[in-house]
Amino acid sequence: MPLNAIAIDDEPLALRVIADHARKIPFLELVATTTNPIDGLLRVQQGGIDLVLLDVQMAMLTGLQFLQLLQNQCAVVLTTAYPQYALDGYEYAVADYLLKPISFDRFLKAVQRVHTQTLRAPLLPNQPAAASLSPEVPGYIFVKTDHRLVKISHAEICYIQGGKDYATVVTGTDKVLTLSSLSKLAESLPQPHFLRVHKSYLVAVAKIVAVERQRIYLGEAVIPIGDTYKEEFARVVRGL
């Protein structure tokens, strides 16, 4: 089944790059391109569009304002030259985002995801992708503290904060100072249930309450998202 797409970007060069990539993909039909987001929105509302390739920064109407008006009518892949905008689309459940300049292999990967999703049962509007992760993670780890080993259930862990030669495992009721490094603990925990989001932090995805820009809220704790980990975090929480 072909995937009908529209590309919206106020930079003609960016549209030419997308059109060139689209011509190489048999299952993708780029039915329209436009530098005017209002025209693009009207075209989507006419129906028959499965995917919008949407620039984030446009003078007339930003990509995020466009998403508010779109109201989940079809899948959206954001395109931007600025990594900090990647997580802004989280609340709108965008399918993916592409950093400019957009390489063909990355473009193909994003489009394949959307194509696969259209062949499956559709998600409910605004359904958080992280809901596919089981809230109860089986298993446990043993961590070394002073002269003993402490057993901690995976399901109890909220996040882990790392230091130079130690790490603190934070649960809902306790903080356990361990003699293990954050990297070693990360290797012993199952992914994608546990995710490195900063050089000093690892979080339990099921414990995430909210995400705002580059901050993760886990109850009263607020964890920063490091630039190095932005892209991987955004993909995991969207269930990509």
Image (cartoon, helix red, strand yellow):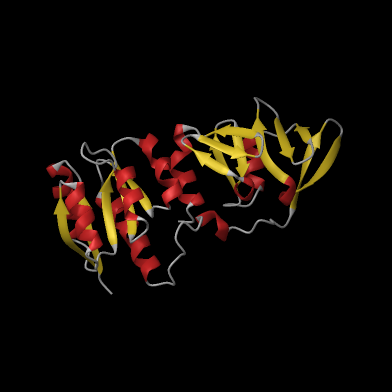
Q: Is residue 158 visible?
A: yes
Could you say where residue 86 lies in the image, as x and y percent from the top left?
A: 39, 41
Q: Is residue 72 left or right of residue 199?
A: left
For residue 61, what is the image quadrant? top left
Q: Residue furthest right?
A: 147
Q: Is residue 70 left or right of residue 133?
A: left
Viewer-proximal residue, 62 or 217? 62
Q: Is residue 23 visible?
A: no
| Figure check: 1 above or below 225 | below
Q: Quadrant of the C terminus?
A: bottom left
Residue in the image at 27% along x and 49% along y? 54
Q: Is residue 105 left or right of residue 193?
A: left
Residue in the image at 25% along x and 61% along y? 45
Could you say where residue 13 lies in the image, as x and y percent from the top left?
A: 13, 43
For residue 208, what is the image quadrant? top right
Could you say where residue 172 lies in the image, as x and y percent from the top left?
A: 75, 41
Q: Residue furthest top?
A: 164
Q: Residue furthest bottom?
A: 1
Residue in the image at 20% along x and 45% along y? 9
| Figure check: 66 above or below 166 | below
Residue in the image at 75% along x and 51% along y? 140
